[in-house]
Image: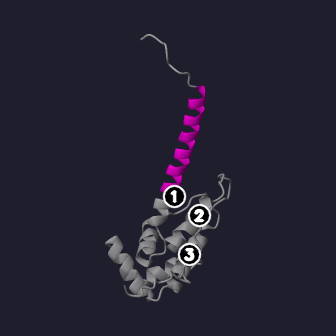
Amino acid sequence: MGNHRRKRHREDPRQMALSFDAPPRVTPTEGLLAGLDTYVSGLVARIVQDDSRSKDEIAAAVSAVLGERVSGDMIYAYSAPGKGSHNISAARFMALILATKRSDALDALVTRIGCRVLEGDEFVLAQLGHVQAELRRLKAIERDLVGKAQPLEGRIA
C-alpha cells in the first residue's frame, strides 16, 4: 500500500475560540445586554475584516442567502459601532454568519446569554455524551433494582 499521510487539521487563525465548556448560567438583570448593538457591530466588523473578500463580495453572498439585495455600504454600516441607526437585523446577521462560515461569531454572541452553538460533528458529540450519561443513569437504576429484587420462586400465580 502507498504511504498515505493524513493531513493535519490546522485551525484557521480567523476562527474565534470555540470550546465545549458550558457557559455560565445567566440571570436576566437590568442592563445585562446594554451595549449589545455595539458588540454585534464589532462582531460584524471582525467577520468582514477577517474575510478575504471585499465588502461588496460579502454583501453579494449575504444577498444570495437572503434572496434580497444587501449592499457593501450596508455591510459597512452594520460594522460601524457609531451608526446606531443601522443595526443589523437578526436575519441579516444569520445570513452573514452563513455566507462567511463564521458560526464562531454566533457562538460568541449567544454565550452572552448562557447558550452555545454546536455545529455538525460537535452536535453529534454532544448527543453522544448525553446518551452515555443517560445509559449510566439507567445502569445505576438497574443496579439498585437488582439489589432490591426478591426471587419469585415458590409463588403460585
Name the quadrant of the N terminus.
Answer: bottom left
Q: Which residues are magenta?
A: 127-148
Q: Which residue is mark 2?
A: 20
In the rendering, at what x and y percent does residue 73 appear?
45, 84
Q: Amino acid at mark 3?
A: Leu
Q: Which residue is mark 1?
A: 126
Q: Secondary structure at mark 1?
A: helix
First of labels 2, 3 by sequence position = 2
Q: Which residue is mark 3?
A: 43
In 3D space, how far apart are the residues under numbered discs 2 and 3 (Cα atoms)? 21 Å
Compared to residue 65, the image places residue 135 above or below, namely: above
Disc 2 or disc 3, which is closer to the eye? 2
Q: How many discs mark residues in the rendered view? A: 3
- Residue at (46, 73) in percent of width and height: 97
In the rendering, at what x and y percent does residue 98 appear?
42, 72
Kindly indicate whether the residue at mark 3 contacts the one at mark 2 (C-beta within 8 angstroms).
no
In the rendering, at what x and y percent does residue 83 appear?
55, 77
Q: Looking at this view, is 58 or 24 the one in front?
A: 24
Q: For label 1, count other residues whose C-alpha is less than 10 Å away and answer few (under 14), some (14-19) or many (20+).
A: few
Labelled disc at residue 146: none
First of labels 1, 2 by sequence position = 2
First of labels 3, 1 by sequence position = 3
Q: Looking at this view, is 7 or 17 the one in front?
A: 7
